Amino acid sequence: MNRYVITGGKTISGEIACQGAKNSVLPIIAAATMCDSPCTLKNCPEIRDVAATLAILRHLGCEAEFEGGTLKIGCELSSAEIPDALMREMRSSIILLGALLSKHRRANISFPGGCELGPRPIDLHIASFRKMGVKIEERHGSLICDAEKLHGAYVHLDFPSVGATENIMLLAARAKGRTVVENAAKEPEIEDLQGFLNACGARVSGAGTSVIVIDGVAELHGAEYAIMPDRIVAATYLAAAAITGGTLTVTGVEPSHLGSIVSIFERSGCELVIGEDRIALSREGAIRPVGTVRTMPYPGFPTDALAPVMAYLSLAKGSSVFFETIFQNRYKHAAELMRMGAAIKVQGSVAVVEGVRRLSGAKVMATDLRGGAALVIAALAAEGESEVTGIELIKRGYEKFDSNLRALGAQIEEHR
Ligand code: UD1
């Protein structure tokens, strides 16, 4: 079983360039398949979720070539059916539904199941699609969709779902007429999707606010586009430096995307220097507890940064309280952190983390992508050796995690 073997106690210091954003590249790849000529995406992260998406594209007959962070995507699809095995590989492949229907007007995909964060329903996606004239039948675990009568519509989301907002944008981009999404998600990745769609000739405005307006166009042409930096990966490296008392600069980031995260590091005693495209962090004194951390839709504190920040605060001089408001089951990593000596009490959506003086190396297992990264962060500061298994989950979203950390001073090896 592949695992990371980490000897803790080394500081994480130096400079690292931030990779492209996982949550931006996936919808943008979906959008590229809607164009009438090929697209070139730059700054694409080499992560397993991109590989899984490309496997689906190839299954659909779409050509894709990925080298050195540049992804070339063709525009010819020979099928609009995504089988169960490929859908299960990555729940977020639901994002391909809007793209397939927008251009090809039909699709047949297997129903995306739950995932490691608990049930992840797609009712908001389906209800919005139906409002836009898509006929959807649920049969034997599959969604059979017909968008021959696709049209723009006024859609109000009961919750600002990131995936539903993106899926509606894709579907609406080539629909007849205007679509207005109210209570849309405001995440920066949605602005990135708008940027790409408009570069291809779409007419989308309002991304980054809670009302997005899409005027459908008949054609989209290919474009070259650079994926935005990954704010969660940036937060993860900052947490690694913070927990080990290092001095780290993360470059190639958009600091305004990390406001709520920077605030937590500052409150806990780190020094931060914010540049135009970089964030420098250092910590010398004790880690101070921060009171309450509540996950919220953007610009609130992101649910994806909860686990790495929790690992960091497990060594604070006092207690911190986490409230997870977006997903169920986001605390699976807490039990693993406790194997390393962390003191965490979880009840429902609340976790109380009482800071301990030291963590000690242990054998732990990644239970999800960000939870896995949190275990690596804890292991960097723990006394002695840790083994983290389940690292395929970490590779879903982190490019060269072990070699990047090694270059910053960590003692981490992948054992096969
Ligand atoms: C995206 C991100 C994920 C991040 C999350 C919240 C990608 C690939 N993933 O996931 O990393 O943690 O945003 O920032 O971009 N919901 C429904 N019905 C729906 C859709 C969602 O009830 O039809 C609920 C979900 O169960 C969850 C909440 O809404 O409780 C938020 O989900 P959503 O914003 O859709 O997250 P994802 O797009 O799945």
Image (cartoon, rainbow, N blue to C red):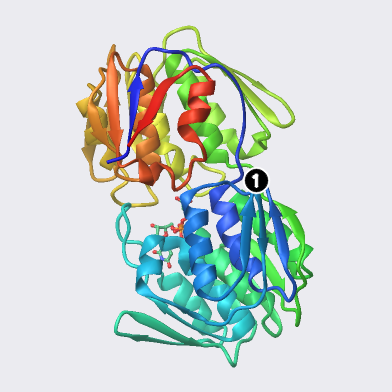
Residue 280 appearing in the image: yes
Q: Residues within 10 Å of mark 1 (few under 14, many from 20)?
A: few
Q: Quadrant of residue 204?
A: bottom right
In-front residue for pair 74/336: 74
Left or right relative to 253: residue 13: left
337 over 333 or under it: above or below: above
Q: Residue at x 36, y 62 (%)?
A: 120
Q: Residue at x 53, y 20 (%)?
A: 408
Q: Which residue is mark 1?
A: 68
Left or right relative to 294: residue 174: right
Point out residue 224 in the picture as x, y percentages from the top left corner.
Answer: 76, 58
Point out residue 286 in the picture as x, y percentages from the top left corner.
Answer: 42, 9
Point out residue 193 in the picture as x, y percentages from the top left corner.
Answer: 65, 59
> Residue extending furthest front?
416
Left or right relative to 213: residue 332: left
In-front residue for pair 229/89: 89
133 over 74 or under it: above or below: below
Ligand 1 location (quadrant): bottom left
Left or right relative to 166: residue 85: left
Residue 205 appearing in the image: no
148 over 142 or under it: above or below: below
Point out residue 132 in the picture as x, y percentages from the top left corner.
Answer: 57, 83
Query: Split into 4 quadrants, where in the image is the C terminus?
Result: top left
* SS state under label 1: loop
Indicate the amino acid at tag 1: Gly
Q: Residue at x 52, y 42 (%)?
A: 300
> Residue extending furthest top?
285
In-front residue for pair 384/93: 384
